[in-house]
């Protein structure tokens, strides 16, 4: 028979205070997201009259129509989408390949390479040497300048190595008996068992590539290769929201659109794609977030 827990006054007071604080923190955290979304869907006329809207009486998508009709904004979404897709795939292949190699005890140079990776974590080269390397490789004004320097990182390699350490080498021996070489065993045996880790690191990489900003400022001078974060920053800082495009000019001529509603719509559009990815990775993310914390 299960005994019910007896609640005393101290427990009730603690729970009440704890829940109240969590509710307050949640409201403070979610309110900016709520306000940005509401303003982006507010009718321009109503926003000009009230300037502060918590729940609009007239809903409108005219701000989204304007933003999505501009060439530069749509092109920026395409650039960021390419970075988040191709960059994430390349980073996962490189990171998992290095981590898997270092996790195998039969690899003779594993200690030397691990020390080199730890050295890069403790002593980073800095912005100017990295810029000189990218320039000498001829990657300035190239989309690959935003991918190749960010392919992997020391912490990611070490964390994923901890996950591969938990996979018994007997599985590789069984694969070798079936005729698999190291590459085939890694591709057909190890990676399918690593879906939680790959999902967790894939989400980290995708968010990082989608939010690429500083590297684009350093390496990209061609505005046609600007990711969405650069365009969004220009919109938020500059009072002018003209992004170009015949459709945008026609729409703006027909109806005046407040600058604030355009900025809020741009923020929502730039945020939604990366948020939409999370539900598909959620079932793997909880396990993958513990990668490297426990060695089985």
Image (cartoon, rainbow, N blue to C red):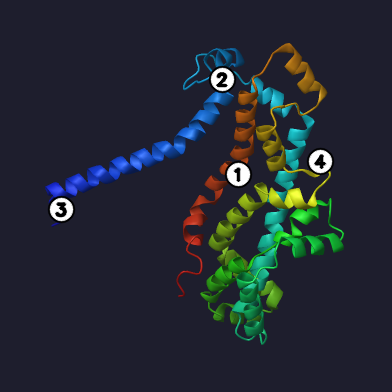
Between label 3 and label 4, give the one nearer the viewer.
4
The image quadrant of residue 205 is bottom right
Q: Which mark is residue 223?
A: 4
Q: Is residue 174 left or right of residue 19?
A: right
Tell me the tag on residue 98. Answer: none
Q: Earlier in the sequence, mark 1 or mark 2?
A: 2
Picture layout, residue 199 above or below residue 9: below
Residue displayed at 50% across by 50% down? 282
Per the image, label 4 sits on a secondary structure element best described as helix
Quadrant housing the C terminus: bottom left
Residue 133 pos. (x, y %) = 80, 64
Residue sitting at x 60%, y 33%: 268
Circle 1 sits in a helix, a strand or a loop, which is it? helix
Q: Residue drawn 47% across and 63% down?
A: 290
Residue where numbered disc 1 is placed: 274
Q: Are marks 3 and 4 in contact (CB under 8 Å)?
A: no
How far is the residue under mark 4 from the one under mark 1? Answer: 23 Å
Numbered disc in front, either 1 or 2: 2
Q: CA distance from mark 1 to mark 2?
A: 24 Å
Looking at the rendered structure, which numbered label has been put on residue 42?
Answer: 2
Tell me the distance, in whole angstroms, between the alpha carbons under discs 3 and 2.
Answer: 50 Å
Position of the N terminus by quadrant:
bottom left
Cα–Cα span, label 3 and label 4: 64 Å
Does 254 sit above or below residue 30?
A: above
Give the mark, 3 or 2, whose residue is nearer the N terminus: 3
Q: Which circle's residue, 4 or 1, is located before the other in the chain?
A: 4
For marks 3 and 4 on the same chain, the one whose residue lies earlier in the sequence: 3
Gap between marks 2 and 4 measured at Cα: 30 Å
- Residue carrying label 3: 5
Q: CA distance from mark 1 to mark 3?
A: 42 Å
Note whether 225 is above or below 102 in the view shown. Answer: above
């Amino acid at each position: 028979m299960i005994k019910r827990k007896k609640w005393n006054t101290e427990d009730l007071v603690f729970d009440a205070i704890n829940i109240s604080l969590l509710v307050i923190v949640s409201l403070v955290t979610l309110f900016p997201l709520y306000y940005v979304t509401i303003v982006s869907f507010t009718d321009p006329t109503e926003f000009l009259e009230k300037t502060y809207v918590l729940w609009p009486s007239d809903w409108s998508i005219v701000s989204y129509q304007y933003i999505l009709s501009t060439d530069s904004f749509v092109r920026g979404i395409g650039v960021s989408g390419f970075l988040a897709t191709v960059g994430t795939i390349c980073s996962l292949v490189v990171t998992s390949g290095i981590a898997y190699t270092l996790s195998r005890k039969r690899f003779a140079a594993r200690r030397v390479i691990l020390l080199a990776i730890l050295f890069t974590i403790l002593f980073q080269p800095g912005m100017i040497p990295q810029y000189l390397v990218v320039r000498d490789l001829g990657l300035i004004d190239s989309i690959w300048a935003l991918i190749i320097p960010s392919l992997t990182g020391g912490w990611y390699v070490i964390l994923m190595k901890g996950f591969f350490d938990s996979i018994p080498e007997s599985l590789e021996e069984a694969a070798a008996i079936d005729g698999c070489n190291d590459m085939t065993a890694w591709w057909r045996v190890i990676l399918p068992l690593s879906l939680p880790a790959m999902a967790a690191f894939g989400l980290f990489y995708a968010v990082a590539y989608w939010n690429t900003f500083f590297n684009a400022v350093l390496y990209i001078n061609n505005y046609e290769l600007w990711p969405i974060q650069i365009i969004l920053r220009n919109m938020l800082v500059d009072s002018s929201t003209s992004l170009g495009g015949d459709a945008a000019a026609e729409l703006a001529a027909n109806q005046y659109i407040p600058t604030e509603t355009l900025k809020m719509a741009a923020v929502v559009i730039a945020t939604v794609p990366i948020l939409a990815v999370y539900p598909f990775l959620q079932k793997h993310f909880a396990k993958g977030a513990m990668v490297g914390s426990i060695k089985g």
